[in-house]
Each structure stands twice: as C-alpha cells, then as structure tokens.
Image: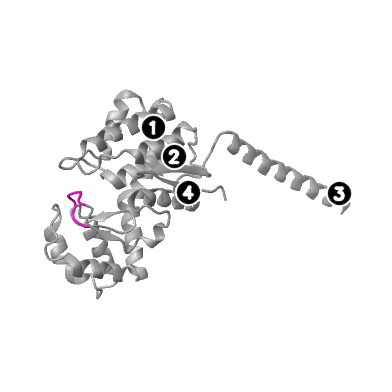
Amino acid sequence: MLRLRALRRQLLVLALLAVTLTAACSSASGASAGLDDPAKKNIAMKLVSSAENSTLDWKAQYGYIEDIGDGRGYTAGIIGFCTGCGDLLQVVDRYTKAKPRNVLTPFLPALRKVKGSDSHAGLGTPFAAAWKKAAGDPAMREAQDAERDQEYFNPAVARAKADGLGTLGQFIYYDAYVMHGYADSAGSVGFRTMREQAMRKIGTPRQGGGESAYLNAFLDARVDAIRREPSHTDSSRIETAQRVFLRAGNLNLDPPLKWKIYGDSYHIDAT
C-alpha cells in the first residue's frame, strides 16, 4: 500500500511538471488562442466599434442606424451593415426566417430594390424606427451576430490563420473585411486585392515572409485603398490604431491596448 501511494505521488508530480512545461513553452513561443477565442473576439468587437460607432460598447449598437453619406444607403447594426451593400438585407432575411412576423418583414421588398444603391425608397424614417425597435429582440441580435460571423469574422480569421498570421493579423484581416468587403466594388478596393498587393511585396508567413513585414505591407495597401475612396479618406483607423499595435510587436493583441480613431483616444485595460 505504501509503495502504491508513493507511486501515485510520483505520477502526480510528473503530471504537474508536464503541465508547467507546456505552459512555459506556449508562453515562450508567443502562442495565442487566436481571434476566435471569446476574450479576443470581444476585444476585436470593441476595436471595430471604436471606428464604426466611436464607442467601445459594441453591444449597444444593435439598434444603430443612419446614412453616413458614403453612397451605401443606411449603415446599421454592430458592424455597419448597409442597405446598398446588401448585407443588411441578409440580416433581415435571417431575422425573418427565425421570426416570420416581425417589424422589419414589411420592408423586405424595398430592401431588395435598393440593394446596390444609396436609395432610401420605401424605407426612410419608418424603417429606421423599425430597425431600432427590432434591436430589442434577441432573435434580431442573433441574426446580426450570425451575419457578422458568416460573412466577415469567420472567413477573415480562417484566411489569416491559413496565411500563418497571429491574433493581430487575424484582426487586421477582419477589420478590412468589415470596412471594404472581400471583393472590389465600384470605386472601392476589397480585401482580396489588398492581400494580393501585399503579397507582391513580401510573402505571407506561410510563404516564408516575416509576419510584421507582411502586415505592414498589407496595411500600406489598405491605407492606399482608403485614400482613394471619397467616403473613406481618414486612415487613422490604421495609423493610430492597428499600426500602433504592430510597431509595439503585440502580435497576440494582448491588453493593455491604447489607440486613437479619428482623434479620439481609447484603451482596454489588462484586466
């Protein structure tokens, strides 16, 4: 019995040593859970909200809606879904499938007609009021979350991981997806073209390029794209936010974080 107890103690000590060594190796290599870790995803949403809504309280933005004069009609919700882009229509479609009788269902025909334009035809004040009212419904919030994940967050993170990028790089891709979309559109350069431009200068980490050097090349391409768009001329979203984290070598996007967007200062504490 004594020998059995001694053996169990030895096995326990060995197990604890293995756990300690694994944690130490992960820390030394800079390993990160990635942007799809819940805590990191929350940071990503706060960063995007600081640019889209001038606040870190992204969960209060489900009911946000206005025409910001960028040629995309109404911009609304947690990441700025647009009537002109068509992703706002997809949100309402999702919501209607989950809850067929809702305050936004009557606007579906108008949303289909204005897709691809900045028109408010059939929408206007009644639609804006209905959007805000619907935001109080959990099913509507779930529809926004699902559209964000399927069209923007998941593909951006998957592409970044395939390119060998860490958490910061995954966020940089995600924010580009949110602001510019994946493909080019009239007068706007999309994520795909930005990535191709960056890769002409330096390969992705998966291709043997340096992570920081590649991300700088990608951000250069994005700044150039922003300055070419009449509705998006301010590049502080890059220069005083994402580039700040990159220069600090914070490839895991670990808090504390300090940045500025359009001249406003924000921070996320380490806790």
- Which residue in the structure is indicated by mark 1? 215
Residues packed near mark 3 inside 10 Å, few (<14), some (14 to 19) or many (20 plus): few
Q: Looking at numbered disc 4 in the image, what kind of residue is underneath it?
A: Lys
Q: Where is residue 22 drawn, in percent x and y?
A: 63, 40
Q: Looking at numbered disc 2 in the image, what kind of residue is underneath it?
A: Leu
Q: Looking at numbered disc 1 in the image, what kind of residue is underneath it?
A: Leu
- Which residue in the structure is indicated by mark 3? 3
- Which residue in the structure is indicated by mark 2? 168
Q: Secondary structure at mark 1?
A: helix
Q: Quadrant of residue 76?
A: bottom left
Q: Earlier in the sequence, mark 2 or mark 4?
A: 4
> Would residue 17 be counted in the magenta stretch?
no
Q: Look at the image and tell me in which quarter the N terminus lies.
A: bottom right
Q: Secondary structure at mark 3?
A: helix
Q: Earlier in the sequence, mark 2 or mark 1?
A: 2
Mark number displayed over residue 40:
4
